[in-house]
Image (cartoon, grey):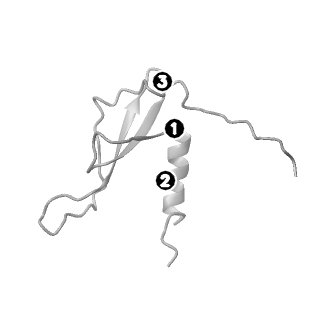
Amino acid sequence: MSDEVAPIYDDKKQVRGSLDLSGAQWQRGDGYSTGEDGADGEHVEVAFVPHTDGVTYVAMRNSAQPAGPVLVFTPAEWDAFVKGARDGEFDEPW
């Protein structure tokens, strides 16, 4: 075994702390459900957010916590995520 560590490539370094989400238009999928009382439950929301570096990043959050944490994907990461979801990569094992 080698003690070599693979280099870390941070392709969002220039974006961290500078992606402006204040004007983000958050979207949900068409098939979201409502709770028993008719109120919206927790849902994943995404927004496509342009940055000053010319790249449009994809932000993802929990609708029940709009001021909470936001995941940010590069276009390549988002493409890989969507393809994985379509291929069943994240399906429950049962």
Is 92 or 28 nearer to us in this picture? 92
| Left/right of residue 65 with respect to residue 79 in the rendered view | left
Seen in the picture, residue 1 relative to 13 is either above or below; the reply is below
- The secondary element bearing badge 3 is classed as loop
The reply to whether callout 1 and callout 3 are in contact (CB within 8 Å) is: no
The residue to which callout 3 is attached is: 54
**Residue 19 in the image, given as x and y percentages of width and height:** 41, 27
**Residue 39 in the image, given as x and y percentages of width and height:** 14, 59
**Residue 56 in the image, given as x and y percentages of width and height:** 44, 32
The residue to which callout 1 is attached is: 74
| Left/right of residue 54 with respect to residue 1 in the rendered view | left
In this view, the residue farthest toward the front is: 3
Q: CA distance from mark 2 to mark 1?
A: 12 Å
Is 38 or 51 nearer to us in this picture? 38
Q: CA distance from mark 3 to mark 2?
A: 22 Å
The residue to which callout 2 is attached is: 82
